[in-house]
Image (cartoon, rainbow, N blue to C red):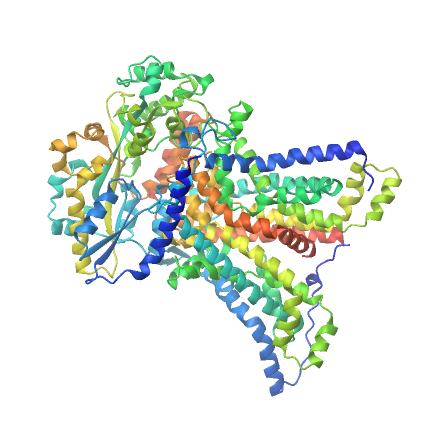
Amino acid sequence: MVKRSHWSKSTVPVRPQTILTRSEVMRQLGAFSFVLPYLVAFALFLAYPMVYGIFISLHHWNPMVGAGGFVGLGQYALLFNFHDLATQTFWQSIGNTSLFVLISVPFLVAVPLILAYLIYLAPAKGLFRPVFFFPAILSATSVMAIWAWMLQTEGGPINGFLGLHVPWLVRQPWAWVSIDLVTVWWSIGFNLIILYAGMTQLAQTTFDAAAIDGAGLVRIFWSIIIPQLRNVLSVVLILSTIASFNLFAQPFLLTGGGPANSTLSISQQIYNQGFGLAHMGSATAMAFFMGLILAAVSFVQYTFVRQRGA
Amino acid sequence: MRITDGFRVLAGLTAVALLGGSTAWRSPAATHPVNISFWTSGSPNGVTQIVNQFNHVYRNTYHINFRAIPYSNETTVVNSALTAHRAPELMEESLTFAAPYAVEGLELPISPFLKMAGINPLADFPKPMWNLAALHGVHYVAPTDGLPTVLYWNKALFKAAGLNPNQPPRTQAQFVADAKKLSQPKKGIWGYVQEPAWPAPFLFPSLLGQFGGKEGNASTKKILFDSPAGISAVQFMYNCIYKWHISPANASGGESHNLFYAGKNAMMMTGAYDYAEAKAKLGKNLGFATLPVIGKKPQDFLGQNYWWVFKNPNLTPKAKRGIAMFMKFFYNHSIELAKAGVLPVWQPAFSKAAFRSIPGFSVQAAALQKGIMNPLIPGWGTAGSYLYNAIDSALLNKVSIPQALKKAAQQMEQTLNQPQA
Amino acid sequence: MKIRQWQRQTLVAVLTLASVMMVLPFFWLLSTAFKPLADAFNGQLIPAHPTLSNFSAILAPGSSAEVMRWLGNSLLAAISASVAVMILDSLAAFGLARLQFFGRQIIFYLLIGSLMVPFIAVLIPLYLEFAKFNLLDTYGALIFPYTANAFGVFLLYQFYLSIPKELEDAAVADGATRFQMWRRIFFPLSLPATATLGMLTFMGVYNDFLWPLVATSSNSMRTMTVGVALMAIGPYNTNYPLLMALTVFSMVPTLIAFIFAQRQLMQGIATTGITI
């Protein structure tokens, strides 16, 4: 069976200590020094930026000029001032990104799950797995360069092959279809090998028993594989949700956020606000807000699958 | 497969390796030339030649580090560089992008530099290009080159359609009639390609002007393009797709160019910045003329490149003199721009025969006479996305044209009038 | 499991079809990279007039695509970051999993909490921090931020927890110091997991897009990913054969690495995926 993680059970015991001798202090410092190098990196490049970010989000901040006036929670209040155009665009980008998550995550879990099962059953497993996996190693740029060309309306090879003029990147809903198609192509391999590895750890005898009872391949998939893979599936689900919420490169390089901002992602809106318009105070507030949403969603998912899996 | 190509690759690799290695051996120059970095988001064609000549002539005193940055990413690149304290001394960009930096106090007034260089802006630049470029009465920028909107056409396709390859359309009626003859949708050949998503920031203001409209008023910050003229301008683009069927519907970004270069699009109306590339790809089949009169009168949006000096505490008087000398050198060598298909804005050049004989120059010089520009409102460049999104929606048939323009005008007005966040 | 003949054949057919769909875009890319511009839109999968001119154009000195430099930047950043991550994370994970010290629990929960922070939330402050220390547009900017990710610490922490206490006791009996214990027992035993972490970090850094996009501004400091992307939306967006040649070139290092390490990489990801 799949090993579960230890950390939620919090098996970090602390020895009760009353007297600190000199040698004990040295021993503790010595132990601490193992963690110290990483902690320095952590403090400088993660913890400090978090705190600094809070400070920035309380100000007007143009990076070329320096910090502007203190506005308190004004930048956060602005996120709910729906007369503000940047706020409207921000909420539009939240809607867009949520839509993408809702469409893409089921595909990112189901397609690799089915493929993993097929490969599990098929001969020549070693041949198929790398084929499905290899796009996952490509950079966003490479992937988008290929697809931006393949999906052109008039001159693109896909429409040329189909003999059609599908407006892949130009009109909705096609723009989302394209972005999802590309995302699935790019990243199913990652989930596929995790799910496949999960399947290989299931007990072969249950399948055989089920097969003797007359269960077909589809029945085994529904009644044995899926329930028994629940833990691995939940990991894949959470990873895919987080990755999908962080959507940036696909619309940025394929549609530029269009048509008319309909594929503008939260990340791109933050990028535009911070680096295009140089409004870093409000961009940071947006980013923190997005961080909260993301943390909440992954937390809910995590506790939900945990309870059901317990 | 041509074997020589393989050798060229190898040679290229070797050259790169040598270049990388040679910097270590380069003997220190007797005198250290003062480095001046100069970036442009415009076309490097012609500018590169001028920079090389300057660096050669002044090799002991000054060195211009020239860099062309991608135009689609210019704002973020320049903003990042400013934040990183790595901004160039001299920057050339579209005029609308210059205004915010001036407002933020990041630019030096340009007049002292022109004075040092012995340039008289009132006489040496085309008048509107100088006069319209003042912000609150101060000039921070000076024009470098103009990019009129022009008509490109494929002479071979004209000939194949039974049209006179040397007679481009001059009116809307001719344009539509020619395009209909040129279009063979079944073969994938079009008379014209109107992309919904990128309706050429050059084309809309040109057509707007031709129909008698204005984009906005710089002093009141009032948006004026949601007028009957603006509606007519977008209606023309719309009709090309849905009424006359001379353009494919739903063309992807860049397809107007891609298909033009592939010989599947007969006409483009866009900025003159593509002249060099189009000439390289179509050769003598390239036709190049001023815009036809789609509206009521000839008008032509003029893409405008300007340069300015970023405020920098490390800028020495000697470097300032170098910048002024380079400016003068640049204008005096305007012929290099003209040869590369870029329109210089150096008034003394326009009367010279050497310029007039360059193909493409006279077309652009004629277009300059009918030139119109964006109103100089800080933030116009980035706020423009509301307008382009609106035109996109209208050309995709999602919103009616008047509604789209009205909403865009409201959004732009709100953005341009709000205090900077 | 018992599978009938027709089922097996159907399976292979379906998987083969799916595989073809997976690799087809890649072959289109390759084919276009070797086509002259005039043939770019002719729809042939096998180029009628194959040419290397696109490659010689991007590699030519003075090309606006400084591909060799970008490649060097990417490799330098990815290798430095993954080596740093492997060492820092392994040490920290060992300390947290097997040693006792004051504040250990707090540090542990801090790291776990940080796993929930999306990168976008620290993007701007990180950028302004680097600006303040004059580190934007340097190799420091391309390497340092990747060393703070707690994922690796967590991954190795779990691994170290599973190493039997007896090994540790034996080492203590031999008089080994804690550092020797890490170097001789824990680090070697965790080498497969550490190598997976290294490979994942390498891939992540080599392919990262948003951070190097904002953290660099000069052409010579761009990474391969960002350099290619800017050529794609800039000067090359109307010359697909050139762009495809550039893309093929940018893929070469990852493809080579993939060919040699695909088994280990897939194994590593699989184990990571089912243990976290």
Q: Where is residue C192 shown, x and y percent of the image? A: 64, 60
Q: Residue at x 32, y 61 (%)?
A: B24
Q: Quadrant of residue B94?
A: top left
The mark tally for this picture is: 0
* Rendered-image quadrant of the N terminus of chain A: bottom right
Q: Is residue B155 left or right of residue A211?
A: left
> Is A208 located above or below residue C104 in the figure?
above
B3 and A58: which one is in front?
A: B3
Q: Is residue C29 visible?
A: yes
Q: Where is residue B292 shown, x and y percent of the image? A: 27, 21
Q: Is residue A280 left or right of residue A24?
A: left
> Is C214 located above or below residue C50 in the figure?
below
> Is B232 located above or below residue B406 in the figure?
above
B257 and B246: which one is in front?
A: B257
Q: Residue at x 62, y 72 (%)?
A: C183
Q: Is residue B212 visible?
A: no
Among all residues in the image, which is located at the extreme bottom?
A: A22
> Is C176 located above or below residue C64 in the figure?
below
Q: Quadrant of residue C8?
A: top right
